[in-house]
Image (tube, coloured by chain):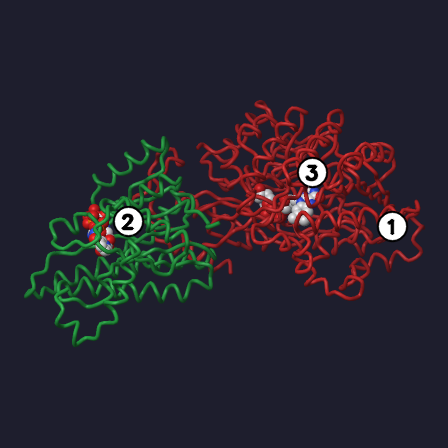
């Protein structure tokens, strides 16, 4: 019988996968703090969740993950408002459009800051607390894009590859302390991030993705591809030798 | 250490204002000052089945203690006191807020071996106390079943011993105390001075202020030994009868019940009666009063080091195992019951459980809860019979059931009354938790209908309406009024207080 999720933070919850995770958790009875920059979107999400639950199960916290200075206080405040904390989902991420011949350090830095350093900041804060408590769950929403350095968006792939390694290190540190760390690698999910993009193989809805993500987290999986068939693809892609990979247009 | 604490507290910037508005703080904006995160700890109830994260501070001086209140005011956090954390449930937890651990305020301030009056700081433990006074021929008038609690924690819960029916609760032996309110005011309280605070803070589960010193009257004894008799009891009626017959004259009475006994054997068990030795009976009081001669041997049957005993007990801490162990215990007492008495040291009789270190670990990771209810003597037979039957019917016979006699006292928040109590230990697992809580709530109904009471030191399962019903609206209203006077900002809180009297 898995330890249920009762009190969770979802970072990057104002839309897409994060919002769907928050709804899923609340529907299962958890209290969730939802974090992102867009106030209105967060408020709408909370209203929807709370109306459905008939009680205050979701609370909004406006925050830009690049403002790391405000994190310790915000984190403490969230734990107090939730009256405890057992799980953190880090789903914040950006993937700006990058032309095939574009080399923009600004865009690259933004992706690293939000997708990677933001994740480190939140998960570190969680790691500190959970290590001391001897329990808790950390879940990072990475991507299949991190499995290989593809030509499309170098920094996005890098940000997710870095996240994967970071999560793996955390897992190796924390599992012995009773804390589980799960890496989620979604394929294509139907959100604003993928809107209008060509070739969306096995596209699933954010709700479907959220269901699978929460279920993998409850099982304390190390790594979960979402949906599961991407594991095979990931394994193949990772084993293609470079001289061939260079020639494949993916 | 107190310097470091003071330093830490004064190093927290005053101007770092954030975004906190908490409904708990009556809508006022609380300044966004964070608490030092290195103070965050997992804080558990003694039964392990309840825990939460708290910012723990361990002051060793009055000034440092006062500083913690100041910190609470500045950060908009509440403060919950914690003694030795021997309450089974959430009484000394304070989730996401300040936990003020008083175990380092543990100085014995004054001792008079002629009068037996002792003045201690609130973090002094029962162990410290008895070991200090025993060689002078004194024993604490009231002790719980374990020696590790602090005097402050015991006063806050107004604890009882196996002599409650003659000696009353610990409060009956407190002559005076000093209480620091969270506003920084120090009250000296006795039956003459600030008597309302005196009667309400004893048993007031840490809601009115912090005991900083407590003056107790202890009990003269003429030997380090007690005269003990074990009586085999075939059923619940016999248990009650045995107590009734022995109430007049006994110094201590306690019943152990095999909760697996059913049908005609429902409520079977063993009663232990113990009596002080009169002056002159013990030929060697100076020897029996030595601390060394109070201890139990380090090994059980000369074989098993007791420090690892819990590992073996683990295999028996399930329905089959306990049934078997209880049967063995019951029958051996029956076979050995020849009506004689034997002598046992005070510590061995009072603190038997302490001699199996970590026994609670045998309950596994989910820990245990204790369910103890107090029922008037007129309805107790019916209520406890029904409780024992209900536990069996629901498939959760208690693994340890203890039966005691009590008397009413002068403290309004007290748990005791003129009647009996039954304490039932239940193993908690993730799977059975909801069922155990449901069983407890069924048993609550029986207790309340029988005019009974509950005990916050043991509680994990009560709901606000249960607490209200047993305390009564008048008592509760008076208590709340007094709390508003001493703690107008509502700084003192614990998880138990939030669960039973919270604003949610
Ligand atoms: C094995 C075992 C056997 C027991 N047997 C008995 C028994 O026979 N009879 C009995 O009555 N109880 C018994 N108890 C319960 C125990 O005596 C009480 O829970 C007691 O309150 C524990 O004291 P503590 O120092 O651990 O306090 P804690 O459990 O830490 O705190 C208890 C309460 O006191 C408050 N508090 C602590 N210090 C102060 C202070 N300085 N000022 C103001 N408030 C304070 C806390 O906020 C809390 O509300 C037993 C417990 C165990 C584990
Ligand atoms: N969609 C897919 O196919 C897919 C596939 C694999 C992985 N992923 C990953 O899944 C995660 C969620 O993406 P999504 O598809 O759900 O996209 P999305 O709808 O755009 O969600 C991104 C979330 O991140 C938040 N965010 C972005 N920048 C932030 C910042 N600086 N501070 C705080 N929050 C910030 C956004 O909120 P605000 O804008 O309000 O701040 C939003 O809530 C991302 O990490 C993404 O990389 C997505």
Rendered view: B328 above or below B164: below
Name the spot of residue B451 as percent of width and height, x first. Answer: 67, 25
Residue bearing the label numbered 3: B171
Mark 3 and mark 2, same subunit?
no
Chain drawn in red: B
The residue that mark 1 highlights is: B222
For residue A83, side relative to residue B485 (left or right): left
Badge 2: residue crowd in 10 Å (few <14, some 14–19, many ≥20) = many
Circle 2 SS class: helix
Of the chain colours in the picture, the one used for chain A is green
Residue B437's spot in the image, x, y percent? Answer: 57, 37
Q: Are marks 1 and 3 in contact (CB under 8 Å)?
A: no
Horizontally, is B485 left or right of A109 in the view? right
Are both tags, 1 and 2, on one chain? no
- The answer to whether mark 3 is within 8 Å of ligand 1 is no
Please state which of the two labelled residues, at mark 3 or mark 2, is closer to the viewer.
2
| SS assignment at label 3 | helix
* Closer-to-camera residue (B414/B496): B496
Residue at figure coordinates x 37%, y 64% from the top left = A170
Look at mark 2 in the image and give the residue it sits on.
A209
Question: As rendered, which of B324 and B106 lies closer to the eye?
Answer: B324
Q: Residue at x 55, y 55 (%)?
A: B60
Comparing labels 1 and 2, the label whose residue is closer to the camera? 2
């Amino acid at each position: 019988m898995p330890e249920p999720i009762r009190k969770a933070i979802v970072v990057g919850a104002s839309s897409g996968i994060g919002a769907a995770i928050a709804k899923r958790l609340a529907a299962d009875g958890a209290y969730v703090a939802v974090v992102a920059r867009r106030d209105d979107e967060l408020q709408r999400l909370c209203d929807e969740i709370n109306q459905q639950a008939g009680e205050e199960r979701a609370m909004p916290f406006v925050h830009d993950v690049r403002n790391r200075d405000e994190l310790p206080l915000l984190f403490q405040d969230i734990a107090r408002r939730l009256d405890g904390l057992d799980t953190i989902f880090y789903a914040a991420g950006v993937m700006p459009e990058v032309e095939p011949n574009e080399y923009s350090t600004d865009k690259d830095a933004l992706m690293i800051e939000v997708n990677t350093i933001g994740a480190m900041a939140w998960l570190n804060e969680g790691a500190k607390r959970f290590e001391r408590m001897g329990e808790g769950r950390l879940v990072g929403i990475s991507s299949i894009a991190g499995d290989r350095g593809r030509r499309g968006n170098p920094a996005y792939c890098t940000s997710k590859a870095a996240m994967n390694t970071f999560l793996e290190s955390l897992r190796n540190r924390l599992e012995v302390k009773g804390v589980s760390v799960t890496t989620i690698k979604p394929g294509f999910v139907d959100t604003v991030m993928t809107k209008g993009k060509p070739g969306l193989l096995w596209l699933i809805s954010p709700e479907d993705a959220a269901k699978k993500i929460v279920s993998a987290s409850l099982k304390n999986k190390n790594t979960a591809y979402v949906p599961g068939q991407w594991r095979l693809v990931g394994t193949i892609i990772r084993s293609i030798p470079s001289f061939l990979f260079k020639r494949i247009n993916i | 250490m107190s310097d470091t604490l003071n330093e830490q507290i004064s190093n927290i910037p005053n101007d770092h204002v954030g975004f906190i508005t908490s409904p708990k703080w009556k809508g006022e904006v609380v300044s966004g000052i964070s608490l030092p995160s290195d103070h965050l700890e997992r804080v558990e109830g003694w039964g392990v089945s309840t825990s939460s994260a708290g910012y723990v501070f361990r002051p060793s001086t009055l000034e440092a203690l006062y500083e913690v209140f100041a910190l609470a005011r500045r950060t908009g956090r509440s403060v919950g006191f914690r003694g030795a954390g021997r309450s089974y449930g959430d009484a000394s937890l304070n989730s996401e807020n300040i936990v003020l651990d008083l175990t380092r305020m543990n100085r014995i301030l004054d001792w008079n071996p002629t009068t037996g009056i002792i003045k201690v700081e609130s973090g002094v433990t029962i162990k410290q106390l008895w070991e200090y006074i025993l060689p002078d021929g004194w024993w604490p008038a009231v002790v719980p079943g374990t020696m590790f609690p602090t005097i402050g924690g015991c006063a806050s819960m107004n604890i009882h011993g196996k002599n409650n029916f003659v000696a009353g609760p610990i409060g009956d032996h407190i002559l005076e105390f000093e209480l620091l309110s969270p506003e920084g005011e120090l009250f000296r309280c006795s039956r003459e001075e600030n008597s309302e605070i005196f009667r309400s803070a004893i048993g007031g589960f840490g809601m009115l202020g912090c005991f900083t010193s407590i003056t107790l009257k202890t009990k003269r004894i003429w030997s380090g030994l007690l005269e003990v008799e074990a009586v085999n009891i075939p059923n619940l009626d016999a248990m009650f009868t045995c107590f009734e017959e022995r109430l007049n004259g006994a110094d201590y009475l306690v019943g152990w019940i095999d909760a697996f006994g059913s049908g005609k054997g429902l409520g079977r068990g063993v009663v232990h009666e113990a009596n002080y030795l009169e002056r002159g009976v013990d030929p060697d009081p100076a020897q029996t009063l030595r601390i060394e001669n109070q201890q139990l041997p380090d090994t059980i049957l000369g074989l098993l080091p007791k420090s690892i005993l819990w590992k073996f007990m683990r295999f028996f801490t399930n329905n089959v195992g306990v049934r078997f162990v209880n049967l063995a215990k019951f029958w051996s007492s029956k076979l050995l019951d020849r009506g004689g008495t034997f002598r046992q040291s005070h510590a061995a009789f009072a603190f038997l459980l302490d001699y199996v270190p970590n026994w609670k670990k045998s309950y596994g990771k989910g820990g245990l809860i204790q369910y103890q209810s107090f029922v008037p003597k007129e309805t107790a037979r019916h209520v406890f019979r029904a409780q024992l039957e209900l536990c069996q019917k629901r498939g959760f016979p208690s693994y340890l059931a203890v039966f005691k006699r009590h008397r009413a006292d002068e403290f309004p928040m007290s748990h005791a009354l003129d009647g009996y109590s039954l304490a039932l230990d239940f193993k908690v697992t993730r799977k059975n938790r909801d069922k155990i809580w449901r069983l407890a709530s069924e048993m609550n109904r029986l207790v309340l209908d029988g005019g009974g009471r509950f005990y916050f030191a043991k509680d994990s399962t009560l709901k606000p309406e249960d607490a209200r019903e047993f305390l009564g609206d008048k008592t509760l209203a008076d208590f709340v009024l007094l709390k508003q006077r001493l703690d107008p900002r509502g700084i003192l809180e614990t998880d138990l207080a939030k669960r039973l009297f919270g604003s949610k």
